[in-house]
């Protein structure tokens, strides 16, 4: 057998080996479009919080920067205690907790938590692009993390629209 033929066989076998590994031994990722989320009048606070959690861990992409629990070197406040932190900040600023949480989502640069940089994008604009209903669900979930949930649907739409108008969102 010539050296060229041996080389071709070796290259083929190596390619076949790695193809087998890629197809059968490595986990395959599937990508699905996000589920359609329906937030309608009469939804309970618990359902709203559950939907908000789904958005925070999925479409909202919050976990890219926000860790679940406090850790050293955090880029953004921890989710597990963010409700309590936001309630405290709202009191210090003399605004309602609802206004503060909505402002944090649609105009995050208006007030940046101490020790962190202004790096969060407004989540109601592309690339994230949450709807008003999704913003309310996320706000309810964030409040549920260490604070009493005072956000509901559709009652909180008025406050959200006020924040959007005031912040130019």
Image (tube, grey):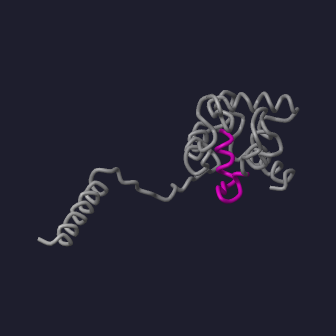
Q: Please tell me which residue is depicted at 60% across the width and 39% down the height of the picture.
A: 49
Q: In which quarter of the view is residue 159 placed?
A: top right
The residue shown at (84%, 55%) is: 168
| Rendering quarter of residue 70 | top right
Instruction: Compare residues 67 and 96 and report the one nearer the observer.
Output: 67
**Vertical side of 164 occupied by 44: above or below:** above
Counting from the top left corner in percent of width and height, residue 138 is at 65, 43
Residue at the left extreme of this rendering: 1
Q: Quadrant of the C terminus?
A: bottom right
Q: What residue is rendered at 58% in x and 53% in y?
A: 38
- Total numbered badges shown on the rendered structure: 0
Residue extending farthest to the front is 3
130 magenta-colored = yes
Q: Position of residue 23 (x, y in %)?
A: 29, 57
* Closer to the camera in the image, 82 or 120: 120
**Is residue 16 magenta-colored?**
no
The residue positioned 76% from the left and 41% from the top of the image is: 117
Quadrant in which residue 56 is drawn: top right
Q: Where is 78 relative to 133, above or below?
A: above
Q: Whole-percent x and y of residue 128?
A: 64, 55
Q: Is residue 101 left or right of residue 146?
A: right
Quadrant in which the N terminus is drawn = bottom left
Region in magenta? 122-140
Q: Nearer the viewer, residue 164 or 122?
A: 122
Which is nearer the eye, 26 or 57?
26
Q: Residue 156: percent from the left, percent from the top?
A: 74, 44
């Amino acid at each position: 057998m010539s050296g060229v033929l041996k080389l071709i066989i070796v290259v083929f076998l190596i390619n076949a080996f790695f193809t087998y590994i890629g197809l059968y031994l490595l986990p395959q990722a599937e990508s699905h479009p996000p589920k359609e989320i329906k937030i309608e009048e009469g939804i309970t606070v618990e359902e709203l919080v559950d939907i908000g959690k789904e958005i925070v861990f999925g479409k909202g992409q919050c976990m890219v920067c926000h860790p679940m629990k406090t850790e050293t070197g955090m880029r953004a406040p921890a989710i597990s205690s963010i409700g309590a932190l936001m309630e405290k900040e709202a009191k210090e600023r003399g605004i309602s907790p609802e206004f503060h949480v909505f402002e944090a989502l649609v105009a995050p640069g208006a007030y940046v938590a101490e020790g962190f940089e202004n790096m969060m994008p407004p989540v109601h604009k592309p690339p994230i692009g949450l709807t008003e209903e999704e913003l309310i669900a996320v706000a309810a979930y964030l409040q549920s993390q260490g604070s009493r949930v005072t956000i509901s649907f559709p009652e909180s739409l008025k406050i959200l629209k006020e924040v959007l108008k005031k912040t130019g969102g």
